[in-house]
Amino acid sequence: MQTPVTVVILAAGLGTRMKSRRAKVLHRVGGKPLVEHVIETALQLAPPERIFVVVGHQAEEVRRAVATPGIGFIHQSEQNGTGHAVMICREALAGLGGYLLILYGDSPLLRVETLTRLIDFEVSRDAENQTAGTLLTAHMHDPTGYGRVVRNARGHVADIVEQKAATPGQLAIREANMGIYCYRAEIFWRHIGKLRPNPASGEYYLTDMPAILDRAGFPVDALQIDDAREALGINSRVELAEVDALLRDRKRRELMLSGVTIEKPETVTIDAGVRIGMDTIVEPFAQILGKTTIGENCRIGAAAIVSDSELADGVEIGPFTVVHTSHLESGAHAGPFARLRMENHVAAGAHIGNFVELKKTRLGPGAKAMHLAYLGDSQIGAQVNIGAGTITCNYDGFHKHPTAIGDGSFIGSNSTLVAPIEIGVGAYVAAGSVITEPVPPDALALGRARQVLKPEWAKKRRAPKSSRA
Ligand code: UD1
Ligand code: CA
């Protein structure tokens, strides 16, 4: 865009109506804090050094939630209203010419296209007849809670009246203020000092600016958007849930239109940062979170949870399986009921079955651990078979120790591998063994008590006392 735009995002309020100890803009929708959504949108309209976030409540946490470097923060130590929040920016921003875009940090659904329309509209009006700004409005079926837009005879904005202060006549106005404004920076900063505290609340209202500018001979216009939901400002947890649902719906539709099958989509949760390849099937109640990437032709089973993981093509995650920060190569299977706890690498064609837990473990190509096992801090070779009930004892109460299992070896059921331990290539561990010494390649290791047999013992035990010898 040629017009230089400076963006101010108001994010200092606590959000009393959220009934929370956490600042409102830190509450999450679509897997991200509210303010992060607004910042991502702003970044498509202005460079980071022209984006400023007004912080106050939990300023440090809000700063930390903002990932992009170079964004400016302005501290509003007392939350004296939306007008006050902008007033305190004057010193830092007045020197930046062009246009000033003011956004509220609690409106995460806003689209870049809508803001571009607003800016273009203001730029063209400005060239024609000296308007000083434009705000976004919408005709709402139920505008409860929003400021009502009062227009004058020429159609310009005469005033914005907040719900609390509105007369019955004004309450009947359906045109609502979306809280998104584009002003000519120089004129705006020249007049902002005229804001006065609201007599009822003592707060400075940014919504008084159109009337102030109009009186100074700079009319303010309003641009209507079709769907007010886009500008929905979150004030309560009910709205938080509504917006979350909308964002999730957007994401699922986008994926379905790009070739992903989602069964019972309304039950599936997918974060904005997730990527999924064509012909992958996502079953009901699955959750795919964070920065997860899934290839083509995969299947994510019912109620599985996959977060911050990478799945190559043809991977199958069975129902009720949890996968976190793990990498599965093509054709790998996990689940149902498996848990890949963290930082695992499962090579091509490897299988992990029910009630198997993996932690910081590498499973080689074609290796199998089909039932009831715990494999922690382990390097497991290609084509290894891990029997049911195998446990790596990786923790001695003080430190974690590694286990290494060579290619093609066979670990019998219910084996206990006391780490640090190494099992050589092609070795066998007999079922029920406790292994504490290294096993050389191709050896058989037995580590269990020898079986004792007592013929006829049971029969004698059952015989009546009188007939016993
Ligand atoms: C505001 C508008 C209202 C509009 C609605 C749209 C005003 C006075 N009213 O009302 O006309 O219809 O948004 O959603 O502007 N904030 C600060 N510092 C403060 C106060 C607020 O940074 O001192 C921030 C909040 O963190 C929030 C945003 O400004 O992100 C909006 O504040 P909020 O209290 O939610 O305004 P509304 O009552 O919703
Ligand atoms: Ca609000």
Image (cartoon, helix red, strand yellow):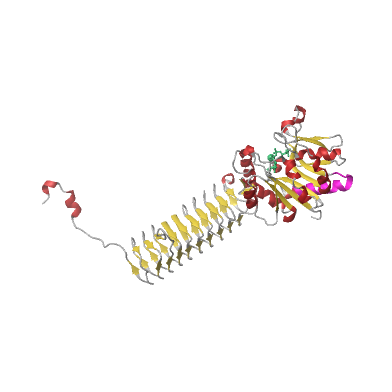
> Ligand 2: which quarter?
top right
Looking at the rendering, the stretch of residues picked out in magenta corresponds to 114-131
- Counting from the top left corner in percent of width and height, residue 266 is at 59, 44
Please give the name of the residue rendered at 75% of the width and 34% of the height, measured from the top-left corner. Answer: 198
Whether residue 227 can be seen here: no
Q: Can residue 156 be found in the magenta stretch?
A: no
Location of residue 158 by image quarter: top right
- Counting from the top left corner in percent of width and height, residue 396 is at 40, 60
Give the side of residue 43 with respect to residue 96, left or right. left
Q: Is residue 166 above or below residue 324?
A: above
Q: Nearer the viewer, residue 405 or 82?
A: 82
Whether residue 101 can be seen here: yes
Main secondary-structure element of the magenta-colored stretch? helix
Q: Nearer the viewer, residue 48 or 411?
A: 48
Q: Nearer the viewer, residue 262 or 212?
A: 212
Please give the name of the residue rendered at 34% of the width and 69% of the height, measured from the top-left corner. Answer: 444
Q: Can residue 127 be found in the magenta stretch?
A: yes
Please give the name of the residue rendered at 53% of the width and 60% of the height, measured from the top-left corner. Answer: 327
Q: Is residue 141 above or below residue 321?
A: above
Give the side of residue 243 with respect to residue 347, left or right. right
- Counting from the top left corner in percent of width and height, residue 58 is at 63, 46
Q: Nearer the viewer, residue 305 or 122?
A: 122
